[in-house]
Amino acid sequence: MKVLVGLSGGVDSATTAAILKNQGYEVEGVTMAIWGDKKVSSHKGTHGACLGPNEKEDIESAEKTAKFLDIPYHVIDCSKEYDEIVLKYFKEEYLSGRTPNPCIRCNSLIKFGVLPYVAREKGIKFDKFATGHYARIIENNGIYNLAQAKDKSKDQSYFLYKLTQNQLKNILMPLGEYTKSEVREIAKGFGLEVSDKPDSQDFYEGNYNELLGVKDKKGNIIDSEGKILGKHNGIWNYTIGQRKGLGISSTEPLYVIKLEKDTNTVVVGNLDKTFKRFLVAKEINFPSGIKITNGNYTAKIRSNQLLQECNIKFINNKLEIEFVNYQNSITVGQSVVVYDNEDIVAGGIIDEVK
């Protein structure tokens, strides 16, 4: 079987390629180039982002891994599609007062969509597409379930909930069965130079305003009673639950509790105002292809959160979710992902919070 492995230049994807080749698969490597000719005024100077001007270094690292493993290697330019599908969405959501999750959109539409499609269009032949994600794909009677990884601290299933059956049946994620420390040891065992390379953490390493490309838009910062506490330069500079960098003084900590696009207003309040139990999600995806029944499940509203007990109703193509316990900073535009034990059964974009 021929497997095309998405190489990012890091330890996880390199180890994935090494494991699969060692298991007897015919392996080729591919890297998607998404930076294009973007110009930025500054960045942190570190290298821990998916999108950034240091992409050339990642490609060089991936190519070096491919040569070491003696496998063919390809670079495919996906920058145009990335700009249209991910960055356009990123900009529209932020300017609307919502908080997007570009990684989720990139995974389903670019990394597991555009990239393998364009690879085939360019004549690269393969049976399966593999990545270094920490998640598991479990087949049961022709149904492919997306499940949490063995290493819950590194689990990335939350970011993959938009994958479909047609995608899951053609994907391999071997690292789902290992812990991160085991992966690094395996990488050392294979002699991979990237075995100790730090993980990438962020979507973008610079100032988000560099991607948004908009001018300041002055507005008011108010409390929940409507009292003006200060001014801001654009609601897109704030996220729900944010405490630091508000630019206002107060005798007690204040948090962003609402962003109002129509009035260009940032609303802040005490910590207790950030806790809610009820949300409505739209754009629902069922990775298994099977719609869930109403009832009790567990869910999370951010990737690094522990699973939370909740009751779910699927009504008019939306999920109505009521958590047993109050949740901090449920954020419109982010995703809620629903699990049955370790399997993802549904997920969607948070559209309302009550």
Image: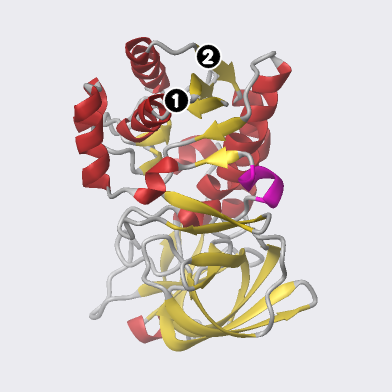
* Of marks 1 and 2, the one in the foreground: 1
Relative horizontal placement of residue 105, taking residue 152 as reference (left or right): right
Whether residue 217 is visible here, answered yes or no, is no
Q: Under tag 2, what secondary structure?
A: strand
The magenta-colored residue range is 164-169
> Which numbered marker is on residue 348?
none
Compared to residue 3, the image places residue 307 above or below, namely: below
Q: Provide residue 157's location: percent of width, then percent of height.
A: 48, 55
Q: Provide residue 50's location: percent of width, then percent of height.
A: 42, 35
Marks 1/2 in contact by CB < 8 Å: the verdict is: no
Q: CA distance from mark 1 to mark 2?
A: 21 Å
Q: Provide residue 182's location: percent of width, then percent of height.
A: 23, 44
What residue is shown at x 66% (from left), y 59% (from top)? 141
> Which numbered marker is on residue 24?
1
Compared to residue 78, the image places residue 100 above or below, namely: below
What residue would you read off at disc 2? 74
What residue is shown at x 63% (from left), y 29% (from top)? 127
What residue is shown at x 37% (from left), y 36% (from top)? 49
> Quick one: quadrant of the N terminus?
top right
**Amino acid type of the residue tagged 2 in the rendering:** His
**Amino acid type of the residue tagged 1 in the rendering:** Gly
Compared to residue 114, the image places residue 254 above or below, namely: below
